[in-house]
Amino acid sequence: MRGRQIVQTPCKVNLYLGIHAEKDSRGYHRVDSVMVPVGLYNTITVEDAPQLMITHTPALDIAGEKTAVWKAATLLAAELGCQPNVAITVENTIPDQAGLGGSSADAAATLRVLAKRWGTDALDPRVVAVARRVGADVPFFLHPVPSLLLGAGDTLEETFDEFAGMPIALVLPKTEGVSTTEAYDTFDAAPTQPRDYGELCTLLRSGVTEAKYSQVAGLLYNNLAAAAKTLCPEIAEIEKWLCAQAGVLGAMVSGSGSCSFAICSSHDEVARVVQEAQKLHGWRAFATKTVGFDG
């Protein structure tokens, strides 16, 4: 396949994130993660070029050769024996260093497009292996549906039925984001044992309807949140504020932060929460929802 391909990739939130103190042979923490795709999107355009070229809009502070997209493209080309003669443009809407998986989503979208371009299924074991090498969340974004991932958070254990439309407010501090590396280093200074994810997975297996949104909200969990709040105290302020808002069923930090998300009782409540977060506090905020995936 040649020519131009344009895809959009959603971000994610962690309904559950459990970090363990122990690490694997690669030095990665054992991570249990339940993620769902959320409708805030980056757009990736791939087209023919004489050599691999990566452009991010807005521009990143690092060279294109150091991005997850570059790594994904070069590793997959080597794995499949192809020449990565493509220009890849990433239009960023998903905030960086937010715990929303933006760079992982970009890398996975790149893998999906290039796999198809080079005649390979996006879930081919070779593509999945490359995704795991690029980053822990990248395998989830190859097929972003509600999922449980284990290992280092990079091994798909189980998928659940989609439940598109659950109202979500995303709220970020005015300050810069949180470094994932720093969050893990802070966690390592005082590690905690995560609680079990079984109850949440049982609920997801039963099928999530609007009537069960409050149950999902009641099971939100993230034992990396304390580290994020230590590094950026404004995150704790946001989460406390969200939990006190009428119409918010539950709120939690996503991933290593700095974004907190709230599950709300309606889209009207999401709009109100987002408007007040922006106007009253100057926080960055987005009104969105869980989404499905059409490939």
Image (cartoon, helix red, strand yellow):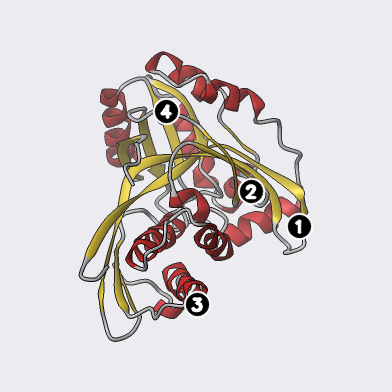
Residue closest to the far bottom = 50
State which mark lies toward you, 1 or 3.
3
Assign a secondary structure to mark 1. loop
Q: Which residue is mark 3?
A: 78
Q: Residue visible at 68% across and 54% down?
A: 186
- In the depicted structure, whether residue 197 falls above or below residue 190: above
State which mark lies toward you, 2 or 1.
1
Assign a secondary structure to mark 2. helix
Quadrant of image for the N terminus: bottom left
Query: Which amino acid type corresponds to the residue marked 1 in the rendered image?
Result: Asp
Assign a secondary structure to mark 4. strand
CB-based contact (under 8 Å), mark 1 and mark 3 = no
Q: For the image shown, how many numbered marks are present on the structure? A: 4
State which mark lies toward you, 3 or 4.
3
Q: Which residue is mark 1?
A: 24
Q: Along the polypeptide, which appears first: circle 1 or circle 3?
A: 1
Query: Which amino acid type corresponds to the residue marked 3 in the rendered image?
Result: Ala
Q: Residue visible at 24% across and 71% down?
A: 2
Query: Which amino acid type corresponds to the residue marked 2 in the rendered image?
Result: Ala
The location of residue 66, given as percent across then percent down, is 47, 76
Observer-nearest of 74 and 232: 74
The location of residue 44, given as percent across then percent down, is 29, 62
Number of residues whose C-alpha sits closer than 10 Å to that of mark 3, classed few (under 14), some (14–19) or many (20 or more): few
The location of residue 204, given as percent across then percent down, is 52, 25
- In the depicted structure, whether residue 129 falls above or below residue 294: below
How far apart are the two marked residues, 2 and 1, measured between alpha carbons? 21 Å
How far apart are the two marked residues, 2 and 4, measured between alpha carbons? 22 Å
The location of residue 42, given as percent across then percent down, is 31, 55
